[in-house]
Amino acid sequence: MAKQQVQDIGKKLWDLCNILRDDGITYHQYLTELSYLLFIKVANELDKEAHLPVGYYWQDYLNLKDAAGEKLLEFYQDALTAYSRHENKLVAAIYANASTYLRQAKHLEDLVTEFEKLNWYSVEKDQLGDLYEDLLERNASEVKSGAGQYFTPRPLIKAMVEVLNPTADMRIFDPASGTGGFLIAADQHIRVKNVAAFDALKELEQDAYLEKAMTGLELVPETYRLGLMNCFLHDLTGDESLGPLRNVNTLGGEANDFKEFDLILSNPPFGTKKGGGKSTRGDIAYNTSNKQLAFLQVIYHSLKEGGMAGVVLPDNVLFEGGLGRDVREELMGMCNLHTILRLPTGLFYAQGVKTNVLFFTRGQGDTGNTADTWVYDLRNEMPNFGKTSPFTFAHLKEFIAAYGDRPDGTAQRKEAKRFKKYSYTDIEKRGFNLDLSWMADDAAAEADEPEAPEVILDQIEAKFDEAATSIKALRAILGEES
């Protein structure tokens, strides 16, 4: 099935959300509901229904589809409970604490009917993951869903994986795994770019690779559920194995033992820890409720000597004073912070923040590991990206070429319009402020140019989303204090 066919089926599945508008279901809730049904249908198509509890197969839904009254909806609610209690670990985890958002039996009947109409015979097994990724991306493109908090644009993930070049002998980690995008991309890169090395592994060693080489931690249960489903459809789990993902709080003490990784790829959550609490880990020197600064410390402390990392972080991490300055100084001492990629605006517009990727390698000691930091500016003199002007892998090709063919950032490099080198001394004089820019500020240059209406609407929606999130957080705090 060509990419266009995958997108066509993805669009048909996504358009079914219109059926549920009367139930007041959000896009994110619909994606969760869709995942429940999709797993059952995929098990049917792949002849893997033996892994589901007897009596709750896809055909059982079809048999009840045209029954009068609430029978199908009642059956579905019972099925979700049965799946959550099943002995199969993967099934039980995907449906853990599952409950349907549907309130009308007719809506479930319509969904089952439309699922059955789709031409599943055109979907090959290795393209099911692409289909699910298409759904995740559609969800992230809806500003109101707030999905940007866990969905990293796939072109960016692909570029980060490309320059860091993971191999089959590495232990790879994502402490904020979201829907598993980084781990899936790393696995696909290993199988395609390092296929000979992967195939050379004995069968038992390949099993060990699948079970131990990849590790992802995700705190939010609903997001963890989507990540499990995504890994399953990308063949990164066994039929009964949970694969690489764990429902664990990275900033809690239970995550202290996740250490000594060869490669870390991550997009930590933005914002502050709920209720203003701090990490309970014992390995963070600068304890803070700022989640990005806490995750950044976890990441460089979790690398083995010579281990590499690529981390997406918002602008405030580059210049925030106080503990922020201390964290950056420690980072540049313990690691070689060799590259910063300044990302275009619009990639995470639901949060309304500007972002960067920091690339660094853990040094031999705890000080003196950064000599120079190269900054690539992909932000200024770039289009405003959004739903109408998507960000693609092609926009990152010049950065990949400038980065060079050494994953640890030690390749010979040349300064250019977008690429500039700063010495450790230069950065130290700036108070370890890493907000380094030499190109004209687009915000000032475009001050007199009217924005396109769709861009303005995106920005307005983003502001409303931020306000709604702040109100919910305040309500939660007040609720805890009352």
Image: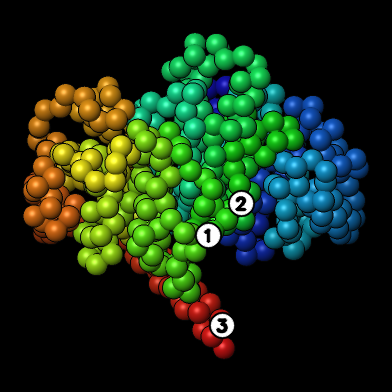
Residue neighbourhood size for the residue with mark 2, other residues' Cα within 10 Å, grouped as few (<14), some (14–19), many (≥20)? some
State the residue position of label 3.
479
- 107 sits left or right of 252 in the view: right
Compared with 227, 183 (above or below) is above
Give the residue type that dot 3 points to: Gly
Dot 2: element? loop
- Residue at 13%, 45% (x, y): give it: 424
In the image, residue 80 lies at what x, y percent?
Answer: 79, 52
Question: Which badge, 3 or 1, is on the more N-terminal residue?
Answer: 1
The mark lying in front, picked from 3 and 1, is 1
Question: Which badge, 2 or 3, is on the more N-terminal residue?
Answer: 2
The mark lying in front, picked from 2 and 1, is 1
- Residue at 78%, 51% (x, y): give it: 84
In the image, residue 87 lies at what x, y percent?
Answer: 83, 43
- Residue at 29%, 57% (x, y): give it: 327
Give the residue type that dot 2 points to: Asn
Residue neighbourhood size for the residue with mark 1, other residues' Cα within 10 Å, grouped as few (<14), some (14–19), many (≥20)? some
State the residue position of label 2.
247
Quadrant in which the N terminus is drawn: top right
Count of marks placed on residues: 3
State the residue position of label 1.
252
Give the residue type that dot 1 points to: Gly
In the image, residue 408 lies at what x, y percent?
Answer: 29, 30
Quadrant in which the C terminus is drawn: bottom right
Q: Hey, which residue is sitting farthest front in the picture?
A: 365
How far apart marks 2 and 3 lie (CA) works out to 25 Å
